[in-house]
Amino acid sequence: MAYYKETIVTQGYYAGISGIQTHQYGLDVVADNLANTSTTAYKGTSTEFSDLFSKALTSSNATTPTSDDIGFGVQLQATTFQMEQGSLMPSDRFSDLAIEGNGWFGATSGTQDYFTRDGHFTFDTYQTIAGDVNSSTARLVTADGKYITGTMLTNFAYDASFDYGDSVSNGAVGAYVISDPTSDVVLSGVNSQGPLEFPTRIAYPVEPTTQTQFFGNIGVANEVRSISADVISASSERNRLKLTFTQSATQPSVGVAWDVAATVTSNDGSVVYDTQNGQALFGESGGLSSFTIASVNNDGTPVSIDLGSNYSGVIAIDSVGISGSSQSDGISGGTLTNYGINTDGVIIADFSNGRQSAIGRVAVYHFQNDQGLNREGGTYYQQSSDSGKPLFWTDANGSTITGATVRSGTLEASNVRMEVGLTDMIILQRAYQANAKTITTVDEMIQKALQMRR
């Protein structure tokens, strides 16, 4: 019986030791959380405790009306990530990104792939053609130089002969040129993502005018009328197409006939590129019956002239006020003004001519089990057999989607709540002290037992 009592006392001693050690681990976790309350996109960690094992007081063949197990202490069973969303904080850089919702940014360094929620990104610059400064692109990188991954489009390419408009001040020509403007980017496969590159000199190509439409009322009075339209040449010059209406010397028995001169000049009128002459015939009610000029040359590009038909374009009615207007297709070339990243992670280039085009997309990765990711430090994580491989979410049609909202000019704050951490610290401290008291109490009991045996 004396041996049994000494054994029970010893188990209490070991239980106290395990309690001290385990709650020390808990304090370490809380301390780490509190230390990272200001770390961008930091995900706090919580602890999960469990008992070690227990020992039955009676033999396996005996029966008792209640449990007769005695535990041997406690252990830290696991630490789990707190995946709650951190607060979103505005920043003054469009390259700072935050994910609102589920997902991870991808970063690569050498052969290693990492995943992070910390969107504090910047740029590094390199020349795709060595020695050609105009071929520079800026790669999106983390603060320590890892490349952020995504899908780049092939709708632009470097043209060493392209005049960006600053060849005199820059001393050389050359720039990237958009070949197929678009507003959307479909992510390629998960394993096909690569570094995101932003050309520092990229141009929107000129789209020369090919069609013009004219509207208005030239009346029936024998006075010279004119309507003009802006037309864009293949060299990105904004020229002037002017229609001059003069009543024909010979008039039809019904309606009115006008001689029309279509002239294309430079915007200041100093250069004449083409002049075409024809006639417009209007019916008795003023609707257009026929027009004989099909097109005119705009510095090498044919431009069709459309006066409408009947009452849909140019008319000649006496009782309606004189008016004239026009519209043309085509757009002048433009140079890069700034980049932006929309809520789907699509990288948009804005140009000086008011046009936009997507050139790439930031990838947002997902995992079957985020808790299975391995923490690598520096707010980086890596996949493991527990997390599964990275994947992209898809919609009901099987199309790849981001699965979250990407906020440009925003950073995610740490999700550690200081008041919770301080409360946990008090609880763990009290538990630590209680286990320490257990050890000293058990030690006194052992000493007392030893004295009784003398």
Image (cartoon, rainbow, N blue to C red):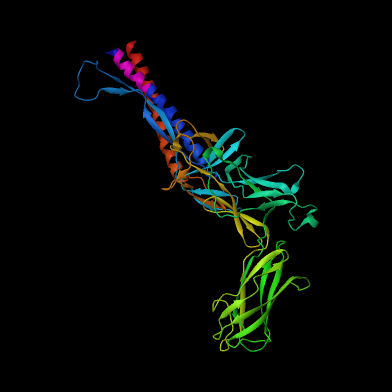
The secondary structure making up most of the magenta span is helix
Residue that protrudes farthest toward the front in the picture = 253
Residue that protrudes farthest toward the top in the picture = 454
Q: Position of residue 214 (x, y in %)?
A: 61, 75
Q: Position of residue 18 (x, y in %)?
A: 41, 25
Q: Is residue 216 magenta?
A: no
Q: Observer-nearest residue: 351 or 212?
A: 212
Report if residue 191 is visible in the image. yes
| Res 4 → quadrant | top left
Number of on-image labels: 0
Q: Position of residue 137 (x, y in %)?
A: 68, 47
Viewport quadrant of the N terminus:
top left
Q: Position of residue 421 (x, y in %)?
A: 45, 41
Q: Residue at x 39, y 28 (%)?
A: 435
Q: Observer-nearest residue: 328 or 438?
A: 328
Report if residue 445 is visible in the image. no
Viewport quadrant of the C terminus:
top left
Q: Observer-nearest residue: 445 or 312?
A: 312
* Residue range corresponding to the magenta coloring: 3-13
Q: Is residue 378 above or below residue 362?
A: above
Q: Is residue 235 above or below residue 274?
A: above
Q: Is residue 153 above or below residue 62?
A: below
